[in-house]
Amino acid sequence: MSPLQWRVRPVLPIAKLLGAVALVVLVVAFGRDDPVQWFIAIAVGAVLIGWAARDLVVPVRLSADTSGIILVTGFARRRHVAWPQVERVRVDRRERLGLRNAFLEIDTGESLHLLSVHELGTDPEEVAAALNALRSNAPL
């Protein structure tokens, strides 16, 4: 069986790169002589470019097969977690300031991994159902 994979939507790194370009355009248009605006624009633009680079270098944030799951941690490091190490897979839904958020929560006992709909490219509820089904069929 081929592993199941969930990846970042391609539109996200493009939007981040466009945001970095928009910052430069705004500073050129409105803050040519202000070094503080240039510094802030360069710093925020660098963060956006780094964030987009991560999405392009490691688009698959989560994959799973019968042996366990592979998660991306840090900038681009992958971590394999065998099914016996996974204590719980669930969806954490919260509402704050009128906005609803849903995160896939993978508890390995020693660490807690949260993945958003943007990182998974689909609804975390669907991913949790697929992971729990795969986990129940995995050999011990």
Image (cartoon, rainbow, N blue to C red):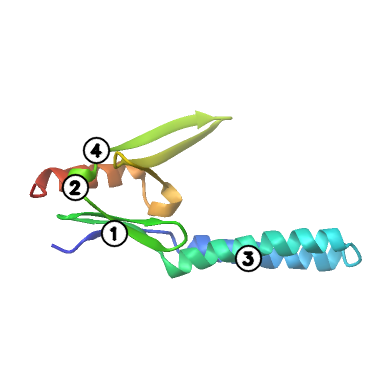
Quadrant assignment, res 80: bottom left
Q: Are marks 3 and 2 in contact (CB under 8 Å)?
A: no
Q: Which residue is mark 4?
A: 87
Q: Position of residue 137 (x, y in %)?
A: 10, 47
Q: Residues within 10 Å of mark 2 (few under 14, many from 20)?
A: many
For badge 4, the amino acid type reads Glu
Q: Position of residue 39 (x, y in %)?
A: 78, 62
User: Which numbered mark, 3 or 2, is in the foreground of this view?
Assistant: 2
Is residue 19 or residue 64 the one in the foreground?
64
Q: Label 3: state its secondary structure.
A: helix
Q: Which residue is mark 1?
A: 5
Residue at x 41%, y 33% (from the top left corner): 93
Q: Are marks 2 and 4 in contact (CB under 8 Å)?
A: no
Residue 18, which numbered label? 3
Q: Label 4: state its secondary structure.
A: loop
Q: Spot the residue most to the right.
A: 33
For badge 1, the amino acid type reads Gln
Q: Which residue is mark 2?
A: 83
Q: Is residue 139 left or right of residue 3?
A: left
Distance (Cα) linking label 1 and label 3 = 27 Å
Q: Residues within 10 Å of mark 3 (few under 14, many from 20)?
A: some
Q: Quadrant of the N terminus?
A: bottom left
Q: Are marks 1 and 3 in contact (CB under 8 Å)?
A: no
User: Which numbered mark, 1 or 3, is in the foreground of this view?
Assistant: 1
